[in-house]
Each structure stands twice: as C-alpha cells, then as structure tokens.
Amino acid sequence: MAELNAAAPAARPFIRMENVSKVYRSGGNEFLAVSDVTMNVTEGELISLVGPSGCGKTTVLKILADLHGHDDGTVEIGDPANPFTPGRDVGMVFQQPLLLKWRNIIDNILLPAEILGLPMKSARARAMELIALVGLKGFETSRPYELSGGMQQRAAIARALVHDPRLVLMDEPFGALDALTRERMNLELLRIWTESRKTILFVTHSIQEAVLMGSHCAVLTSGPARMADFFPIDLPYPRRLDMRQSPEFGAYSRRIYDLLGME
Ligand SMILES: Nc1ncnc2c1ncn2[C@@H]1O[C@H](COP(=O)(O)OP(=O)(O)OP(=O)(O)O)[C@@H](O)[C@H]1O
C-alpha cells in the first residue's frame, strides 16, 4: 500500500511550450513573427498575453489552435490518456463578436455545437445554462442588433463555451468596447472563468487589464518579436477594480512597462 504521506507527483502542465518560434514566409521573404515562447500552463489558469501591436500575440493563439504550425521548439497540449483535439477542444473569442445577424442569440450560441454535430437537445440545455452564466437570460430569441456591444460579446463568450472546450483563446475580446463596459466585462469574465474553471489565454494591449485578469502573465516584445517573460500574478481572487491602486498591482505593472522598454 502506498504511504499516505508520500509526496504527490507534480501535475503535468496542460500546455507545454518550449522555445517556440514562428516565421512567416512569402515571396522569398522571411518574417520572424514570434520567438522564445516558453510557458507551462496548468489546467484552469487564465493567462494574459500582453505586448505591443505586431509582437506575435495572435500568432501564439493560432499555434495553440493548430491553425498553423510553428518552426522551432515544441508545443504539447493535454496528454496521451486524454488527447487534445483542437477542432473539438478550442473555443475562440475575437475582438468583434461576429454573430450571424439572421440568427437569434441562442441559435448563434449553438453554432459550434451544430458544426461539431453534437446532440442538439443537450447542447440547447447547455446553451441555456451559458446564457444565464453570461447574464443574457431573457434575450434568447433576440437578434444580435437588439443587443449592446457588451451583450453581444457576452453571447460570443457563451458561443465559445457551448461545446465545452478545454481551452478558450480570446484575442482582445474587449478591445472594441467603451472603457466602462470594458471594465465591467473584465469583472464578468473573471466571474465566468471562476465558475467554468476553463483554461483561458487572453490577449490584450492593456497592461492594467493583463495584471487585473491573469493568474499568470506572458509579456511579448517586438524588435525582435519574442516572449520576454512569463510570471505568476499573485494578487488575491476575487479581483476587484480598486486593486489597481495597490502597491502590488503597481509593481506588476512596472515590471511589464520595464520589459516593454516604457518608462
Ligand atoms: N499570414 C501572415 N503572413 C505574413 N506575416 C504575418 C502573417 N500573420 C501575421 N504576420 C505578421 O507577423 C507579425 C505578428 O502578427 P500577430 O498578428 O501575431 O501580432 P499581434 O501581436 O497579435 O498584433 P496585434 O496586437 O496588432 O493584433 C506582424 O508583424 C504581422 O504583420
């Protein structure tokens, strides 16, 4: 019988990226989009990816979604006992909600379940749960144009979760929202993450948003495009907007500003 007090083996990280780089090639030219991407992500974490425009943040998401390959390094997700299938296991949220205007909200949310051929009765029940989770109860049969930008983005988040993906990739999901709605959506996403326990990679240009949201933060720099740092953000949960005034929050922000070469 195993000793009860034996140390448990360290859990294998869900995502393992080691020195990953990606070069785009066209017309005989080569362009280094990102390099030195190294991170271990435990299942259920929310990782902020922050950096200036063009430093390769979207490229990292595309590599994880298997939308394109990479050049150097290794990328492993999941494990042999529970293999990761990007087409089935990834949910995506973009800067624009990209809802189909001729479908109502619940039918928009059900789209990935339809595409994947999932049983629609249980998918519809899950969609109803997600509508409640993202705060859209009562809007199931509304058309996208009847909802505000923030509400449309909530629908897009529910759509990304409807097929119960293991990994959610968010590419600047709140970049098109006004400042107040964006703050409210930050808190909403933290609540949704806490309740759903999904692994989320969250791309942002905002240093404050990266610190407020992330359990870890990956900082990408340009010239050359590389991952400069990956570190935990040890601020307590639930996160609150007033934490942005704390010295600890300021120290994390300064660390990122320094890495980005901004005074
Ligand atoms: N398919 C492609 N072919 C050639 N170059 C590309 C391609 N996709 C992206 N790039 C270039 O690679 C670099 C990284 O692009 P990427 O979209 O990953 O950056 P990003 O950090 O997400 O930028 P942003 O914050 O502006 O969205 C950019 O300079 C971009 O122009």
Image (cartoon, rainbow, N blue to C red):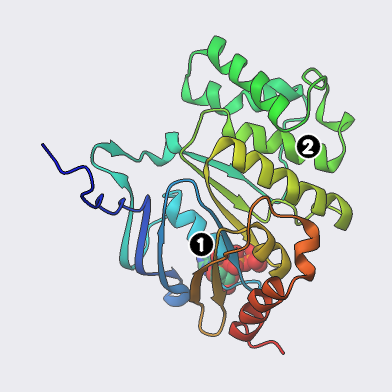
Q: Tag 2, which secondary structure?
A: helix
* Whether residue 36 is situated above or below residue 94 in the rendered picture: below
Is residue 188 toward the left or the right of residue 25 in the image? right
Q: Which of marks 2 and 1 is in front?
A: 2
Q: Where is residue 199 in the image (x, y as percent from the top left)?
A: 50, 46
Residue at coordinates 71% horizontally, 25% vertically from top-left?
Answer: 131
Ligand 1 position by quadrant: bottom right
Residue type at the position of mark 1: Thr
State the image quarter where residue 114 is shown.
Answer: top right
Q: Tag 1, which secondary structure?
A: helix
* Whether residue 81 is situated above or below residue 110 in the rendered picture: below
Towards the viewer: 151 or 113: 151
* Whether residue 232 is situated above or below residue 121 in the rendered picture: below
Q: Position of residue 94 (x, y in %)?
A: 66, 48
Mark 1: C-beta under 8 Å from nearest atom of ligand 1: yes
* Whether residue 184 is situated above or below residue 163 in the rendered picture: below
Q: Mark 2 points at which residue?
A: 152
Is residue 109 toward the left or the right of residue 231 in the image? right
Residue at coordinates 57% horizontally, 80% vertically from top-left?
Answer: 222
